[in-house]
Every structure is written in structure tokens, then in C-alpha cells.
Image (cartoon, rainbow, N blue to C red):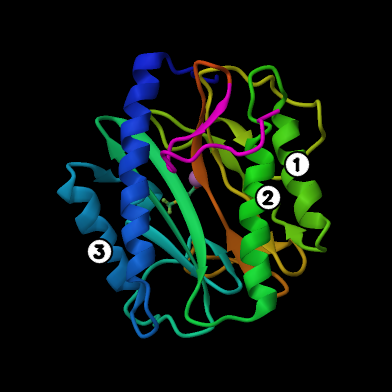
Amino acid sequence: MIYLKNSQQIECMRKSGALLYDVLCRLREAIKPGMSTAELDVYAEQLIRKHKAIPSFLDYNGYPASICASINEEVVHGIPTDKVIVKEGDVLSVDCGLILDGWQADSAFTVGVGKISPENQQLIEVTEESFFKGVRKAVNGNHLGDIGHAIQEYAESFGYGVIRDLTGHGIGRNMHEEPSVPNFGRAGHGVRLRAGMALAIEPMIALGDYHVAELEDGWTIVTEDSSVCSHYEHTVIINEKGLPELLTYPGFALTEEAQ
Ligand code: MF3
Ligand code: CO
């Protein structure tokens, strides 16, 4: 069942989203060659707790950290560790979630560490742009498939692989709610989108093929062909006006008219 959020609940989600935006901005600034992914995780947990919020990933199905830090061919769910040192040229994705006053926010970004190859830089930019192509379709009256279709069409036009085994999701009092939000699909198909729906839209795009595998740690997802992958995610509400609002990117206004 899809839980629609009323204005009061949307207001709560705006607060948790804004806090997560702040946390992710600070994490992004902190990323330097030579640091371990565990250091980034410690910093994230400190920032979250300082604001009386709860790191939602920690202990989620036994997950041992507050962020996921996934490098190069790692798609998502990379476990932070002091053994992994980020280095110049890496493509690092950081995914983080928190709960403020009972309301979840979930967001991820990918950055190049120091100087990266033009090929990898383009992958990061196209992944972000594919998110924005998708989110513009998150409008009252559209269908869920419109979002995935827009993401897929854009990413595949560059020859990239759109990961299929992992999807976005509804979000609210729980990190993962219905519906599941694939990054591929058919326009005009799927659940009808409604004001009050909160969705985590999160394209995962690979330079190569879309097939993925899980590592023996039981968490880390990698591309099967070891091609570099990028991930970009925001928590989005279809607001009282029936239009998409990026809760984890407050103040950002979609430039083109959402449709
Ligand atoms: N942020 C992930 C998602 O979008 C969830 C991370 S799973 C965890 O679904 F176990 F790492 F928390
Ligand atoms: Co998510």
C-alpha cells in the first residue's frame, strides 16, 4: 500500500530532507585523497546525531555503518572501512539516510576524487541529468513508468547500462515503502502518481553492462563486467500542487516546467 503524505507530514519530511542535504554537503567537502571510507562514515554519524537525528542505515538488516561508500565498479552498499583509502582518480558514491522526528530522508551523490578521466566525469554528469529527466515526470496524474522511462532513455542514449536489480522506492516513516521505483520502464504504464507520494528516485548507471553481482560480504553490489558505476538519489515529494519537490535538495527549483 502506498501511504500518501498530508501537508503536515510533508512539512516534517521537508525538515528531515533539509538536514540530510546539509549532512551530504559537508561529507562532499570532506572527501580528500588519502582518507578512509570509515573516516567519512564516522563524520556522517557525528553530523546526524548532533542534530538529534538517527542514522537510518546503521543496523538496517544488520548493515554496520551510517553511509554506503561505493568506489568505481561498486554500484551501491559498499561498507565503509579503514582499509579502503580513497585515491585520486576514484569515482566515489556516498549514500546516506537519516530519521528526524520519525521521518526518513535518503540521498546519494557521486564525485570524482581529485582529477578523474573525462569518461568517468561524463558518467557522473549523465547519471545526475538522468535523475532530473526522471524527476520532472514525478507529477500528479503521470504514471510511475514515465519516471523510469525518462531515466532509461537518457542514460541509454549514451550507451550506458541502467542497473535493473536495484530500484528506488517509496519513503516516509519507513526507508523503503511502496512503490518500488525502477530506473527503466514504459511511459504511461504503472501506478498513477498522486500528490502526497514521497519517492526516493535513484538512478544507478554503469559505463558498461547493467548486470550486477553481490560480493561475499553480503552487501557490496558490483557491476559484473567491473565497469565504473555512478549513483544519484534524492527524496522527492509530489507536493500539494502536484509537482515534484526535491526534499533533499531544498531551494532547488526544477528549471524546465515539470511535465
Ligand atoms: N540508501 C539505500 C537505498 O536507497 C539503502 C541502503 S541499505 C543499507 O535503498 F542497508 F545500507 F542501509
Ligand atoms: Co534509497
Q: Nearer the viewer, residue 190 or 159?
A: 159
Tell me the residue that label 3 is attached to: 43
Circle 2: element type: helix
Q: Is residue 5 above or below residue 122?
A: above
Q: At x 77% / y 63%, what residue is drawn? A: 160
Tell which circle, 2 or 3, labels the residue nearer the N-terminal end: 3
Disc 2, ligand 2: is the CB inside 8 Å?
A: no
- Quadrant including the N terminus: top right
Circle 1: element type: helix
In the rendered structure, which amino acid carries the disc numbered 1? Ala
Mark 2 crowdedness (10 Å alpha carbons): few <14, some 14-19, many ≥20: many
Q: Quadrant of residue 205?
A: bottom right
Q: In the rendered structure, are the residues bearing label 3 and label 1 in contact, judged by CB atoms less than 8 Å apart?
A: no
Tell me the residue that label 2 is attached to: 130
Q: Nearer the viewer, residue 59 or 28?
A: 28
Query: Does the magenta portion include 249?
Result: yes
Q: Which residues are magenta?
A: 243-259
Query: Does the magenta portion include 125?
Result: no
Q: Position of residue 117 (x, y in %)?
A: 64, 81
Mark drawn on residue 240: none
In the rendered structure, which amino acid carries the disc numbered 2? Ser
Tell me the residue that label 1 is attached to: 150
Q: At x 37% / y 29%, what residue is drawn? A: 13
